[in-house]
Image (spheres, helix red, strand yellow):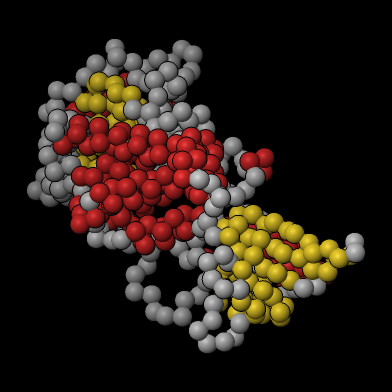
Amino acid sequence: MEFADLIKTPKLDGVFLHDHTHATVEGTLCITGHHLLLSARQENSQELWLLHKNIDCVEKKPFVVQNIIIGGLITLKCKDLRIISLEIKFAKEYYNVAASLEALSALHNAEMEYPFFYRPMYAILEDGYTMFRPELEFAKLISVNNANNTNGIDNGGCEWRISNVNKDFSVCKSYGMTLIVPKSITDEQIVQSSMFRDGGRFPVLSYRHDNGATLMRSAQPISIQGIKRCRADEAILNVVLGRSKKGFIVDTWGKGKSNTETDQHYSQWKKVNRAIGNVSSPSAILDSFVKLIEACNDVNCSPDKWLSRLESSGWLTLVLNSLNAACVVAQCLDQEGSPVLVHGAKGFDSTLIVTSLVQIILNPDCRTVRGLQALIEREWIQAGHPFASRHRYSCYTPQQNRPKNSGATFTLFLDCIYQLYMQFPCSFEFSTQMLILLFEHSYFSQYGT
């Protein structure tokens, strides 16, 4: 299939643009394989460049005169929360443009997306695919003991090593090829531990604090009849304890909603329940986000009613619980000096929110521009967060059209950073504008990974 097959009207003059924030503009509409463009061809006039991937919902409203359609209004509700309307004068072009945008915004073949076609017009100074190699990034978090072992990473009695056991993704499909694991743990033990955890997501190093306390993340133990323990998994956590007398297992899924480690076999680990919310599926977070945006878009809502709708959306509760869980983990690492294992259900969503926020709270480097980029690469992309399924649809897609695995997890994470930024603006190198850009790119990538 070619893009030309989907573009029924590539160019159209006399189109009116209404975006609810600027004056109406009349210009020429162009539809390419990846972008919708509208320009008045006048200096200092508004110009629209909209990636098709940004379109979340296409709504059509035909203009009817004496039972004859003479044109119509196409409203594009975007994943970056913009609402854009295109007013088209003629019926045929109205239907052609609407059909083209519906088809182009619904493509799910990764090889047809813009990053595969983008050709920069400038010299590339840094290759984004190699900027944040795991072994280099983790070397910044933990000290390398070159005297004893060139590949060893010392951690107050527990050394770490780089493992390529997952180089073909056979151990865990959602983990990266390069992982940091305790030096004394063999690859065979890692494989055994992966069979004990949901999706094969065995405990891996996430962060090492200045005092030597380590933060790990994993999925919950699986529930299989006859399998009640895994000695290899126990060995990983016992090695991580190092000189500490106790560790903490923080469950972000909630008491009674997930499988967890038994007290008998993890006797030195204290379990702490810090549920992010009443989340039975990732779509519950998106449902809360939908209610938030509906309240924000209701311009006729009174202040009292708006505040009531804001509260009932549950979004601020998710933000509060996420920050509370992160603060508990940060205190365990910083004040107790104890290692912490964080997991939820599959370890894709609430787990990554908490481990990322902990590092933003404790590690000043993560509050810089490059440090935040590295954190997202390390804790979200390399950690296997399913961006494609979670963020394929956003708040404007009707609920009946959204798969159950849709979510707004990364959006929740960014809102949590925003709340931290508003309280401690001088502790961050970047501004809220960068968070807005990250929000946009989580839903539609213009150029990157």
**In the displayed image of the protein, which residue is found farthest to the left?**
147
The residue under the point 20% across, 54% down is: 427
Residue 263 position within the rendered picture, expressed as x and y whole percent measured from the top left: 29, 14
Asked if one can make out residue 148 in the rendered structure from this viewpoint, the answer is yes
In-front residue for pair 399/362:
399
Q: Is residue 251 left or right of residue 60?
A: left
Using the rendered view, name the quadrant where residue 66 is placed.
Answer: bottom right
Residue 354 position within the rendered picture, expressed as x and y whole percent measured from the top left: 33, 38
The residue under the point 50% across, 45% down is: 302
Q: Quadrant of the N terminus?
A: bottom right
**Vertically, is 106 above or below 222?**
below
Q: Quadrant of the C terminus?
A: bottom left
The residue under the point 75% across, 59% down is: 61
The number of discs equals 0
Asked if one can make out residue 182 in the rendered structure from this viewpoint, the answer is no
In-front residue for pair 160/17:
17
Q: Is residue 169 left or right of residue 69?
A: left
Residue 97 position within the rendered picture, expressed as x and y whole percent measured from the top left: 73, 67
The residue under the point 78% across, 62% down is: 62
